[in-house]
């Protein structure tokens, strides 16, 4: 039995299989993987791409939020134009323009500070007729409007202020106006530049 074991161990076929296995192990050992320098370069590239892509994504998201405000401001300006054309005067509250445009608002607790966080997924309510300001259905904007004297002309002014958490400082406002004296209406979107971001401190910032 011992003899039989040595015969099998020393047989040419078994020796050849062992040599093949040793060759495969050498080839495996000789294969190269990623070096530390290569890994560092890859990580740096991912970091650089992320630093470029993330701000661009955030800017695009803020721009999409701003479009909601632009639509509301434009609708208010058109409604004020229609009201003045029909009645010869400018509207003073939401009730004056409800036959031309109706608006809904977010009406959740904490919307003044939390904004879209508390308004998301909730049912909006109708803006009351006596209102001259309201929060957009998303909660991302505070909409305000008034009739005021500007440079001896009585004009209708609207502004949409970014609202809620960090967006109140990082979002971009939208303003609009209608001047019946020269029959001009304007809608402005503030840019994403640092100087334009955040809430407007005065109605004169509305550029109307």
Image (cartoon, rainbow, N blue to C red):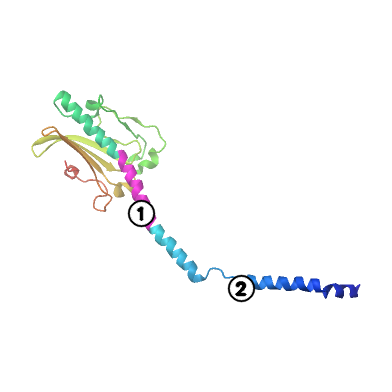
State how far apart marks 1 and 2 are (Cα): 44 Å
Residue pushed farthest left?
152
- Residue at 30% from the left image edge and 30% from the top image edge: 103
Which one is in front in this view, the residue at disc 1 or the one at disc 2?
A: 2
Residue sitting at 35 percent across and 48 percent down? Answer: 60
Is 202 rendered above or below residue 20? above
Residue shown at 29%/49% (left/top)?
169
Is 76 within the magenta? no
Asked if residue 91 can be seen in this view, the reply is: no
In the rendered image, residue 61 lying in the magenta stretch gets the answer: yes
Residue 38: give x, y in percent of width and height: 49, 68
Q: Which mark is residue 186?
A: none
Q: Quadrant of residue 179?
A: top left
Query: Where are the magenta residues, as a range?
Result: 52-68
Write down the quadrant of residue 125 in the picture: top left
Q: Is residue 147 left or right of residue 5?
A: left
Image quadrant holding the N terminus, namely bottom right
Most foreground residue, 165 or 104: 104
Indicate the secondary structure of the residue bearing disc 2: helix
Q: Which residue is mark 1?
A: 55
Residue occupied by mark 2: 30
What percent of the width, then of the height, locates residue 119?
38, 38
Identify the element where label 1 is drawn: helix
In depth, the one of 52 and 99 nearer the eye is: 52
């Amino acid at each position: 039995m011992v003899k039989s074991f040595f015969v099998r161990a020393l047989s040419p076929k078994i020796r050849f299989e062992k040599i093949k296995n040793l060759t495969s192990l050498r080839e495996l050992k000789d294969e190269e993987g990623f070096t530390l320098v290569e890994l560092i370069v890859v990580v740096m590239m991912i970091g650089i791409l992320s630093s470029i892509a993330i701000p661009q994504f955030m800017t695009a998201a803020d721009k999409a939020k701003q479009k909601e405000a632009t639509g509301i401001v434009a609708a208010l300006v058109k409604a004020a134009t229609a009201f003045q054309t029909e009645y010869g005067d400018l509207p003073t509250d939401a009730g004056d323009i409800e036959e031309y445009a109706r608006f809904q608002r977010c009406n959740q607790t904490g919307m003044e500070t939390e904004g879209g966080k508390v308004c998301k997924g909730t049912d909006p309510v109708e803006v009351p007729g006596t209102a001259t300001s309201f929060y957009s259905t998303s909660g991302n904007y505070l909409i305000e409007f008034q009739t005021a004297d500007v440079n001896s002309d009585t004009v209708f002014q609207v502004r949409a202020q970014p609202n809620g958490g960090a967006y109140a400082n990082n979002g971009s406002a939208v303003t609009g106006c209608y001047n019946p004296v020269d029959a001009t209406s304007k809608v402005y979107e503030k840019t994403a530049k640092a100087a334009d971001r955040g809430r407007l401190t005065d109605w004169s910032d509305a550029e109307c």
